[in-house]
Image (cartoon, helix red, strand yellow):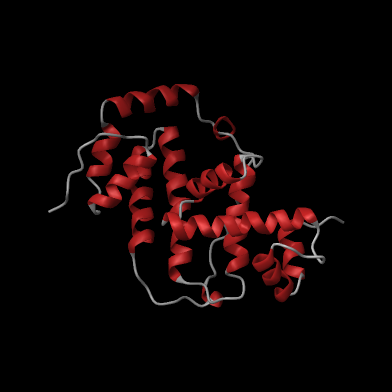
Amino acid sequence: MTIGYLAQLQLLPMPIINNFRKTGKSSAMKAELQQYVRELDAVMQIKETEYFDNISRIARKLQLRYPHLAFTTAKMRVYDAFNFFHINDTVTSDTWDAIYADKMEDLAALCLAKGNEKTAKEALALAHEYRTKAKSRIKPEDMTGNTYVISIDIKPEDLGFETDNLKEIARKKRDGYYLEMINSLNTSGSEKKRLMQDAGITDAEIIENE
């Protein structure tokens, strides 16, 4: 039975992996596994130098370095990098908050596509909370609860979303609906600017909260 790259990597002793990451050479690793490690390293470099944690944005940056990667594959590399490089460490609240903030932003996008602006706004507010709250470190055994299933094969149409919704979203964007929604959030100006960039809103006035 063929096992995935992440499972193969986890079977190798860490000294072998660390030596390859330092030297770029290894007689104990297949060529495709070496390339996989390079891509995981690139994910962490992007995360540390670009100062953002959004899975999709990191995946797009990864594609610029490795154009042969499809977007869905690039996203899987990001998840694999997060899983592998934190597997032997205490998982920090910042790491988990970043991952769940991404999930909330993805949920907001799905809700907007379905025309459910109220739930989308609530999901964006939760994403902001996850990204900004500061907590003490979290033990791995404490991280129990809901199980999230992620599928890279589901299309909006499979969930019942209609093409007309895209036209409605475009109209609301032109009318400034989403700009008003983001400006109404109880968050900082820099966070509002980031949300506007993710939503494709440019040259818009940011209203600071009192």
Against 163, is 142 above or below? below
Q: Quadrant of the C terminus?
A: bottom left
Marks counted in the figure total: 0
Residue at position x 49%, y 23% in the image: 163
Against 200, is 3 above or below? below
- Whether residue 178 is visible here, answered yes or no, is yes
Q: Is residue 31 left or right of residue 129?
A: right
Against 113, is 98 above or below? below
Viewer-closest of 21 and 135: 21
Residue at position x 37%, y 44% in the image: 119
Viewer-closest of 55 and 136: 55
Q: Is residue 103 left or right of residue 10?
A: left
**Residue 187 x/y as whole percent:** 25, 54
**Residue 5 x/y as whole percent:** 74, 57
- Whether residue 52 is visible here, answered yes or no, is no
Against 136, is 118 above or below? above
Most extreme residue toward the right, as rendered? 1
Residue at position x 58%, y 48% in the image: 75
Res 144 → quadrant:
bottom right
Residue at position x 33%, y 62% in the image: 132
Q: Quadrant of the N terminus?
A: bottom right
**Residue 191 x/y as whole percent:** 30, 51
**Residue 115 x/y as whole percent:** 39, 33
